[in-house]
Amino acid sequence: MAVDTKPPALRRSRKKAGARSGDLLRAVTSSTVMWVLVVIYALPTLWFVVSSFKSAGELFTYPLTFWPKHFTIDGYVKAWTQFDFAQYFINTLIVAVSATVLTVVASAMAGYALAKYQSWWLKIFAVCILATTMLPGETILAPLFLVVRNLGLYNSLSGVVVPAVITATGTFMFRQFFLTAPNDLLEAARIDGSGEFSTFLRIMLPLARPIILTLAIFSFQWRWNDYLWPLIILNDPNQFTLQIGVASIIGANNVNWSVLLGASVLSMVPLVAIYLVFQKYVMSADMNAGLKD
């Protein structure tokens, strides 16, 4: 049997060198894969944005060119002026902001109750909420329309907002987060005489800031891009949301592609801005804040 006569220090140095080379290989491989995915996803989006600065005739010239020969913002100007884009934008902003605020409040309160209160009927209620995620949204459109109509909310922005407030996804996001929150915080607050609502508002909600921002971003995106439900519930052009307004640019016989691309890019701006501003807060929490060892 061969005996390794090399000094221990040399063996350790070679093991460390092998470990470093393995880590470097994994880092290079993962970085290469990520950059390939970035190119795959970013190239069509970049082409889409750059094409919005082309004229309608240049969009279909052959051979196709990536970079515009003559930059123009004519599509943006026509989208904003000829199709009442400003009104659609304001309507969508009202729907998205109000629905997002109400969704976060309702989801946080429901998730806190499901996580921190022990009762058999709350467990059954949690299962019922989870079961709603197994149904396609289209299956409840008819009964939801009847309820909204009977409440007198048809053809109004309130009819778009109210059904969007309660979401099973948001409720369970907060429930899972509050389940991991230390109960010592609640016990300490109760000993100090803090009420349930005050404890929730002053202690639990600040801890849940990453979940609040995450759900707010998702909810704003859902409501901003929602097309089917506003199309069903709204009949007045003055109440149309942005997605319906962008769809109205597509005519029966022809499509002004430069205007359509300009309107589509404008509709993306708020979502991109919100994500860039709040992305550093998403899913970053200090669960042990306020506790002593």
Image (cartoon, rainbow, N blue to C red):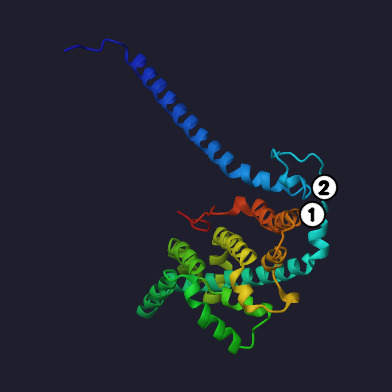
Q: Nearer the viewer, residue 72 or 250?
A: 250
Q: Residues within 10 Å of mark 2 (few under 14, many from 20)?
A: some
SS at badge 1: helix
CA gap, disc 2 to disc 1? 8 Å
SS at badge 2: loop
Residue located farthest toward the top when viewing the structure as drawn? 5
| Left or right: 153 as drawn, with respect to 172 | right
Q: Residues within 10 Å of mark 1 (few under 14, many from 20)?
A: many
Can residue 191 be seen here? The reply is no
Q: Nearer the viewer, residue 282 or 162?
A: 162
Name above or below for residue 109 compared with residue 177: below
Q: Could you tell me residue 188's position as x and y percent?
A: 48, 67
| Left or right: 45 as drawn, with respect to 125 | right
Residue located farthest toward the front when viewing the structure as drawn? 253
**What amino acid type should be assigned to the residue bearing mark 1?**
Gly
Q: Residue at x 77, y 65 (%)?
A: 85
Quarter where residue 132 is shown:
bottom left
The residue pinned by badge 1 equals: 75
- What's the mark number on residue 188? none
Q: Residue at x 54, y 62 (%)?
A: 208
How many callouts does the rendering have? 2
Q: Could you tell me residue 211's position as x and y percent?
A: 54, 60
Query: On the rendered image, what quadrant is the N terminus found in?
Result: top left
**What amino acid type should be assigned to the residue bearing mark 2?**
Thr
Q: Residue at x 41, y 20 (%)?
A: 17
Report if the CB atoms under discs 2 and 1 are less than 8 Å apart: yes
The residue pinned by badge 2 equals: 72
Quarter where residue 88 is shown:
bottom right
Q: Could you tell me residue 261's position as x and y percent?
A: 72, 54
Residue located farthest toward the left when viewing the structure as drawn? 1
Q: Could you tell me residue 68's position as x and y percent?
A: 76, 41
